[in-house]
Image (cartoon, rainbow, N blue to C red):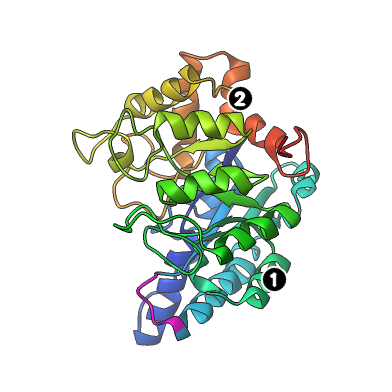
Amino acid sequence: MHIIDTHCDALLKLQAAKRNELFQGQPLRFLDGEELDTNFLRLQQGGVKVQFFAVFVHPELPDNEKWQHCLEQIDLFYSEVLRQPLMKHIRNWADIDRLGPGEIGAVLALEGADAFGNDLVKLSHLYRLGVLSLGLTWNFANLCADGVGEPRGGGLTLLGKQVVQLNNEHRVFTDVSHLSRAGFWEVMELADYPMASHSNARKLCEHPRNLDDGQIEAMFSRNGLIDAVFCPEFINPASRQATIEDLLRHIDHLCALGGERHIGLGSDFDGISAHVTGLEDASAYPNLIEALQKRYSETQVEGFAFRNFLSHRPGIGTNHSKT
């Protein structure tokens, strides 16, 4: 079965390894690097058809270094990820339909607007380079919005609202997974293409990175996607460990709130230090599919795995325009 995974942090690991080479570190290959949960061979083994690759620039970096870090990760996307002949760059959403047998689509995503600050020319370059999903924040505040870890809990700035409008114009997802509550609700008012690329249900796990029932229902009413994340800390409130059964309870809850056709998968592979037992890397996706097939119909499982995403792509399928 095909898988569409809306979040991984392989580019950050590749960048760290590349920089460490300067100090006699070992190179890391996207093809088969053991340290990568989402290396090419593991994506193949897991049946992944489309993988989102996040560009993440840590907010604590000096401002004058952030753009360089962003460009380094994008360069690795082109030079390492797309170096594999079967990895195909998804530059517009229709490209997914053109993937051939054995080919894997690669999508560029931006996790946090820190990389471009208030420079919309830089943002224009990111769109041209192929960014198709953009989250305004990571956990903290920047010039666009507050993240979930910012104590003041502010919403979007005027710049942040402008960026959402630009996302709409470019048919780019606005990702809410790290936004403050106030920012989330403002995105609900503005975004044509909202998505939570890697979030779970807060009712089952009280973590600020998860969405409460009101937020979940708002996402569904706005025709948004919520992609279940595999980080144990966002799955099981009792410990930093989790099983596939624990993860499925979050999918059950999303379905109970009316989300059967709005649920996807956003692993956060390569961005998490602990893993769900049985979901240690992308090659283990068949374990999740098998567990889903024991409690859902084949049509529902295909929806969670890839079809729900395909029907919610910006500009394709269901109309996302606000009424």
Outermost residue to the left: 238
Label 1, secondary structure: give it.
Answer: helix
Residue 242 lies, in percent from the top left, at: 28, 34
The relative height of residue 2 versus residue 169 in the rendered view (above or below) is: above
Q: Determine the residue positioned at 64% across, 70% down.
A: 123
Q: Determine the residue positioned at 35% across, 43% down.
A: 231
Residue 12 lies, in percent from the top left, at: 45, 66
Rendering quarter of residue 126: bottom right
Q: Give the total number of marks visible in the rendering.
A: 2
- Disc assigned to residue 124: 1
Instruction: Please say whether residue 261 is one of the residues in the magenta stretch.
Output: no
* Quadrant that contains the N terminus: top right
Residue 131 lies, in percent from the top left, at: 65, 61
Q: Which residues are magenta?
A: 59-63
Residue 82 lies, in percent from the top left, at: 65, 63
Nearer the viewer's eye, disc 2 or disc 1?
A: 1
Disc 1 crowd, CA 10 A, few/some/many (<14, 14-19, 20+): some
Q: Nearer the viewer, residue 101 or 11?
A: 11
Q: Which residue is mark 2?
A: 261
- Name the side, left or right, on which 113 lies relative to 107: left
Kind of residue indicated by mark 2: Arg
Q: Nearer the viewer, residue 190 or 200?
A: 190
* Quadrant that contains the C terminus: top right
Q: Earlier in the sequence, mark 2 or mark 1?
A: 1
Kind of residue indicated by mark 1: Ser
Using the rendered image of the protein, determine whether residue 110 is visible from the camera's viewpoint. Answer: yes
Label 2, secondary structure: give it.
Answer: loop
Chief SS of the magenta region: loop
The relative height of residue 257 versus residue 75 in the rendered view (above or below) is: above
Q: CA distance from mark 2 to mark 1?
A: 32 Å
Q: Determine the residue positioned at 41% across, 73% down.
A: 17
